[in-house]
């Protein structure tokens, strides 16, 4: 904890490299998919009750903060790193439970926050009052095979991210993701506002992604964008409720095997596709969440 800076120097030449290359250049040079096992800047494995408070963290060779602890708080940190840097996730709970990630400012080259559920199961996370700049958004996955449940995301702003709210997985690492809520969210200049995708890659396997009991309330997209609402098949439907979810500009949608329930406040878009059903229980007339005070300067 403290007001200092931890600098991973991921964009600077590594001593002893000929020609001189940085971790980020090595990442691109060796693995175009960003999977090179470069060092993580901060990582906890096991233990209980970890606190990360106030620090400024930047330029990780790979992920910035990876937490594998039961009981943790990440509070008031700032992560600002070159948006072109490869695989530089901001904060990644990985097999971690009973945690709070709150009042943070994160702008980076990959997922701003990625909840990684390879195992043990992730349960009981609160992600509140955060601001995202560049990056790939608020993600769960792509590892979900250990299970992810009981995650609450509230009061989030996403300003210029590639993705907005995203759950991603595939057959090589799929599993059950359930009881996830997103409340009071503002997005602007986001390319893909909603991504619920069990076909994140073409990797083979038998671990079917299954996303259920997902809830969106008071979500305002200042603009449009391309969105995905997809379940894996008729036996693994995406089930979701949407309440006061508004896009200012019409978007495009890729949807299949999804059961969507609207209301009581309006939703102003309707994805269509194979196996998609929409139940409209709207009785209210809300005009969308007020995002005028949602933004910060990065």
Image: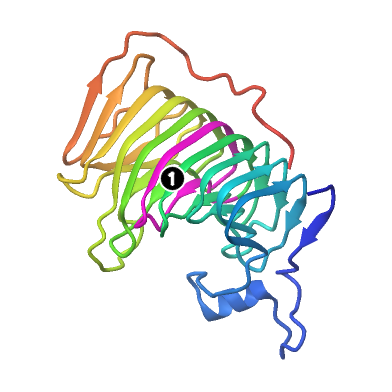
Residue 204 magenta-highlighted: no
x, y percent for residue 202: 30, 65
Specify whether 147 is left or right of 128.
left
Specify whether 10 is left or right of 257.
right
x, y percent for residue 133: 64, 44
Observer-nearest of 76 and 290: 76
Which residue: 29% across, 28% down?
Answer: 270
What color scheme is it? Answer: rainbow
The residue where tag 1 is placed is 166
As drawn, 122 above or below 180 = below
Q: Which residues are magenta?
A: 135-161
Q: Which image quarter is the C terminus in? A: top right
Observer-nearest of 111 and 297: 111
x, y percent for residue 33: 48, 70
x, y percent for residue 3: 84, 47
Res 180 → quadrant: top left
Q: Are there few (<14), some (14-19), or many (20+) residues within 10 Å of tag 1?
A: many
Residue 139 magenta-highlighted: yes
Q: For numbered disc 1, what is the local secondary structure?
A: strand
As drawn, 268 above or below 284 = below
In the picture as drawn, the residue positioned furthest to the front comes out as 48
- Total label count? 1
Observer-nearest of 225 and 137: 137
As drawn, 6 above or below 248 = below
Which residue: 78% across, 59% down?
Answer: 6
Res 265 → quadrant: top left
Specify whether 194 is left or right of 98.
left
Which residue: 45% across, 12% down?
Answer: 286
Observer-nearest of 32 and 177: 177
């Amino acid at each position: 904890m403290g007001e200092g800076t931890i600098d991973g120097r991921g964009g600077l030449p590594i001593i002893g490299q000929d020609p001189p290359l940085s971790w980020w250049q090595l990442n691109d040079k060796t693995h175009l998919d960003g999977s090179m096992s470069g060092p993580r800047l901060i990582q906890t494995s096991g233990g209980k009750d970890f606190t990360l408070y106030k620090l400024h963290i930047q330029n990780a060779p790979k992920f910035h903060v990876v937490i594998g602890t039961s009981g943790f708080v990440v509070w008031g940190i700032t992560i600002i790193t070159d948006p072109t840097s490869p695989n530089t996730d901001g904060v990644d709970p990985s097999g971690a439970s009973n945690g709070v990630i709150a009042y943070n400012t994160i702008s980076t080259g990959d997922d701003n926050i990625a909840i990684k559920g390879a195992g043990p199961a992730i349960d009981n996370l609160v992600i509140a009052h955060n601001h995202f700049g560049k990056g790939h958004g608020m993600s769960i996955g792509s590892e979900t095979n250990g299970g992810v449940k009981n995650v609450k995301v509230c009061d989030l702003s996403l300003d210029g991210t590639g993705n907005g709210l995203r759950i991603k997985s595939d057959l090589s690492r799929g599993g059950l993701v359930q009881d996830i809520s997103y409340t009071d969210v503002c997005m602007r200049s986001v390319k893909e506002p909603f991504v619920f995708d069990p076909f994140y890659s073409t990797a083979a396997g038998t671990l079917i992604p299954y996303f259920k009991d997902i809830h969106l309330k008071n979500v305002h997209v200042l603009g449009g964008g391309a969105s995905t609402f997809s379940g894996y098949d008729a036996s693994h439907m995406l089930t979701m409720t949407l309440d006061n979810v508004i896009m200012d500009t019409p978007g495009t949608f890729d949807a299949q095997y999804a059961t969507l329930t609207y209301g009581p406040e309006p939703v102003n878009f309707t994805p269509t596709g194979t196996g998609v059903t929409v139940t409209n229980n709207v009785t209210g007339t809300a005009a969308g969440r007020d995002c005028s005070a949602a933004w910060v300067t990065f």
